[in-house]
Image (tube, rainbow, N blue to C red):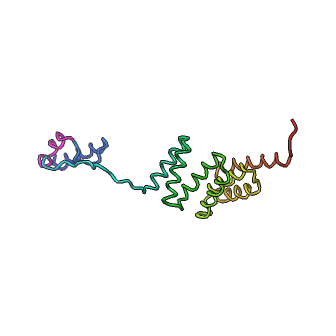
Amino acid sequence: MKPYVKIFSVLSASTLLGCAQPSLAPAPLLAAASPQLQTLPRVQPFERISSPVSQAEELFIMGRSAQSAGQLALAEERYAQVLNMQPLHLGALNAIAVIYAQTDRNDKAIEFFRRALELDSKASHVHNNLGYTLLLAGRLPESEAELKLARELSPSSWQTGQNLEVLARTQERALAGPQLV
């Protein structure tokens, strides 16, 4: 068998084992493949790989992680840091507004949702979030308009459908008037 065939076999085996760089194969395998390969320098791994995202994006990701872990104060802090760096960050505007709504600061939530919509008027998830927050605030006609727009922009959104159902039940109760117990 020719030496290059043996090298190919060794390299293929190392790739199958998850080794991305053939020169990182154990020395005995390289020696068996070819004596010339013993003289190749060993490749050293990088000490540090630079981050492909900006500092603002790193903070945004940390904020999302904190929010999903229920650490709303920490998430709010991270989103505020993002907005200090990039006041027009759509994701941070929406996310901090969600936190405001979750913590009963509906007026502030509505303000931030509207700022996000100034950046992207076709962001259906923001229209949905604004519609639900308006629903929580008891502003039913505005809520209906936002939720219907969210439905038009994203007809298959399960969340928007759920929010429209909650709105319909709330409107029915409002029409029925106060209930005696």
For image coordinates 69% across by 47% down, the residue present is 162
User: Magenta stretch mostly in which secondary structure?
Assistant: helix
Task: Verify whether residue 104 appears in magenta.
Answer: no
User: What is the number of callouts on the image?
Assistant: 0
Q: Which segment did they paint magenta?
A: 26-37
Write down the quadrant of residue 29 in the picture.
top left
Q: How far from the left and from the top, in percent, is residue 83? A: 52, 57
- Left or right, 145 with respect to 83, comes to right
Residue at the right extreme?
180
Foreground pick, 105 / 135: 105
- Left or right, 16 with respect to 156, comes to left
Residue at the top extreme?
181
For image coordinates 67% across by 54% down, the residue present is 107
- Left or right, 126 with respect to 15, comes to right
For image coordinates 75% across by 50% down, the residue present is 138
Quadrant placement of the C terminus: top right
Q: How far from the left and from the top, in percent, is residue 97? A: 61, 53
- Left or right, 163 with respect to 112, comes to right
Q: How far from the left and from the top, in percent, is residue 172? A: 82, 47
Foreground pick, 160 / 105: 105
Q: How far from the left and from the top, in percent, is residue 65? A: 50, 45
Task: Verify whether residue 35 appears in magenta.
Answer: yes
